[in-house]
Amino acid sequence: MSHLERSTHCTRRPAQVAATYAELREAHGDRFLLGIGVSQVAVVDASSEPGRYRKPLAAMRTYLDDLDAAPVPVPGDHRVLAAIGPKMLSLSAERAGGAHPYLILPDNTREAREVLGTGPLLAPEQTVVLTTDADEARTIGQEFLSGYLTYAIYANKMLQSGFTSDDVETVSDRLVDALVAWGDEEAILRRVDEHLDAGADHVALQVLTGDMMELPLRQWRRLGAALGDRHAM
């Protein structure tokens, strides 16, 4: 995911991103999809001058213009935007191949599909904890979500989705259960199906464990086997 700030200053400039995209595609074929997001106001203001993050939609339009003007442009259908709100979702349909919403509910996936229409790719992220221990799953989920819910875009989305300010501020069990799919493989796949039924084309699973620094190889293998068994049926 390419991190984008509000103006021409960003952690990866469009020409650099376009050149890297071209190198990856030449080396590995048509397998790479470029994700672009405008980050959060607290992140951008902390890493740059305060007040810089004021017009994220305009910044994204400028960044896409610069990608199009690069010596080797990134084709529109080979990039997706990190989009949650209707304006960024609309831009995803107009100027990209689709959207990659982060930290959303299946109902939000349905809303996103309505904005995008039938053509663009919709690939929401779904956080998962592969455990049947409710206390363990909620502890891991609460720790993970507590940081994200300090950002207005995610907190407001949950408030708009029917959760209370107390749910958001305390990261309640109800909110954890809604945002983090936990349980066995069957439970995880049920949540994936909810997104697919709501209009997702692909669901990107982010697997959490009690150790945020550890790659969840065992959990990936279990989920991969479950998905393989499903496709074999």
Image (cartoon, rainbow, N blue to C red):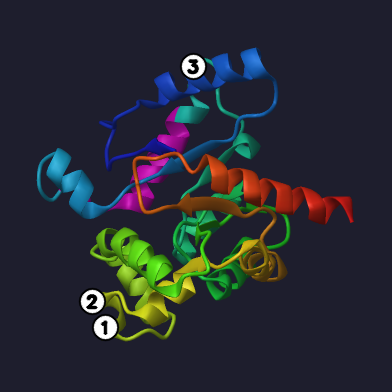
The nearer-to-camera label among 2 and 3 is 2
- As rendered, which of 218 and 67 lies closer to the eye? 218
Q: Which mark is residue 19?
A: 3
Q: Which of the two discs, 2 and 3, labels the residue nearer the N terminus? A: 3
| Type of the residue with mark 1 | Ser
Residue 130 is inside the magenta segment? no
- Which of these two is toward me, 201 or 61? 201
Question: On the picture, is 127 further left or further right than 142?
Answer: right
Find residue 215 and report its horizontal and vertical position in percent: 45, 39
Image position, residue 115 (x, y; %): 59, 66
Residue type marked 2: Glu
Left or right: residue 146 compared with residue 104: left
Residue 231 locus on image (x, y percent) = 83, 52
Q: Which residue is mark 2?
A: 169
Distance of mark 3 from mark 1, alpha carbons?
44 Å
Q: Position of residue 121 (x, y in %)?
A: 66, 51
Residue 74, quarter of picture: top right
Residue visible at 44% across and 74% down? 134
Q: Which amino acid type corresponds to the residue marked 3 in the rendered image?
A: Ala
Real-space Cα distance between discs 2 and 3?
Answer: 42 Å
Span of residues in magenta: 52-66
Q: Secondary structure at mark 3?
A: helix
Which residue in the structure is indicated by mark 1? Answer: 165
- Tell me: residue 215, above or below residue 109: above
Q: Are marks 1 and 2 in contact (CB under 8 Å)?
A: yes
How many discs mark residues in the rendered view? 3
